[in-house]
Image (spheres, grey):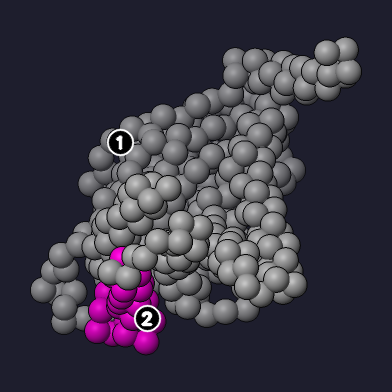
Amino acid sequence: MLKQWPGIVLLTTSLLTLCIPAVAATESALHVTSAQLLNIPSQGFSAPPQRVDEQLLPDNWTTVTLPHALTRQLLPTSAEHENAKTPTIETWYRLQLPASTSESQQQLYIPRWKTDGNLAIYADGQLIYMSHSGVYWNGWNIPLSISLNATADTPRPRVILLRIQRPSDSGGGISSIWVQDSSSLNWRYRLRHLLQVQLPYTSSVVFLAVGLFSFFVWCTSRHEHSYLLFFFISTASFIRTLHYYVGETELPIPESWFSWLTINALFWMVLVTHFFLRSLHHRPTGWLSVFVTLVTLLAGVLTLPLLSGLLNAYALSPLIYCALIITGSIVAGVGAYQS
């Protein structure tokens, strides 16, 4: 027990280091939990403008509570059928901030936002941030900490505008927002980034490393197919979780094919897990093997980027994930029964 005391003391000290500034910062940070919402139908994607005059936007704002979810439009209108461009929705959030007498640098902190599209942020009409890459590589799982007045003699803005342009058949959402001094919000951003990005990504890499070790074990014992199957499981799991961490930098692969990989990696995991369990149980499941294989192949074909002109992957995604849930449940149930 005495040997464990140094570790306990170190852990307690680390928690106190996080909690003490957290209590002090909570008293002064501005927590924004309401905003005004505006949806504008559009066609295709456009780059965000450098400056925006909110007076020129349509005057039909509605008040919403943050966090807020954006619904998807599954049934296209007749006008969308006739237009060759991708039907999109330009969503605006308007945040009214009180006047501030603080001369320190102010920070805008967004813990979470999600959409298949682009995000741009304006402070008093001036662009201060825009998501990089494309529709899928936009860093939606990475928390944002943006300076509002980094330049000299710049007061804190009174109006913050968030512009989200997304496909009409894609949903989304945004969390509540914090505004305060950089030092006050630093702990929130770092802790969120650690728990939401760094630790999960490290876990994925470690799981992949264990799979690589299993692969080398299989190279020396080719008759032990379970090691090879475990390697495939770890690889598919790593590919599936990549879209949670990439976005700030592009990968050397077309964006449409990257989306296809992340969707189908789930089916690959279910398929390989089934064969992994079958190799452990040594019991015949011919009908289930054929069923899972056919579902995996069908999902892969229906979501191919080459067929995007005929089939809409966004509209099919609810059905595809329903098929995944059913297939995964059957594989898990049969595996539990055989074990």
Mark closer to the chain start, 2 or 1: 1
Magenta span includes 295? yes
User: Which residue is at the far top?
Assistant: 2
Kindly identify the amino acid type of the residue bearing the numbered disc 1: Val
Q: Mark 2 points at which residue?
A: 304
Compared across the picture, whether 274 is left or right of 141 comes to left
Residue 296, picture quadrant: bottom left
Q: Is mark 2 on a helix, strand or loop?
A: loop
Judge depth for marks 2 and 1 and give the one in front: 2
Give how far across and how far down residue 227 sits, in percent.
62, 64
Is residue 190 among the parts visible in the rendering? yes
Relative to 82, residue 57 above or below: above
How far apart marks 2 and 1 lie (CA) works out to 37 Å
CA neighbours of label 1 inside 10 A, class few (<14), some (14 to 19), many (20+): some
Mark yes or no: residue 317 visible.
no
Q: What's the magenta region?
A: 288-312
- Residue situated in front as seen by the camera: 210 or 174: 210
Q: Look at the numbered disc 1 and give the secondary structure of its residue.
A: strand
Residue at 21%, 59% (x, y): give it: 73
- Per the picture, the main secondary structure of the magenta-coloured stretch is helix
The picture quadrant where one finds residue 117 is bottom left
Residue 39 spot, x, y in % from top left: 28, 53
Mark 1, residue position: 64
- x 24%, y 84%: residue: 310
Q: Name the mark on residue 298.
A: none
**Residue farthest toward the left in the current orientation of the protein:** 78
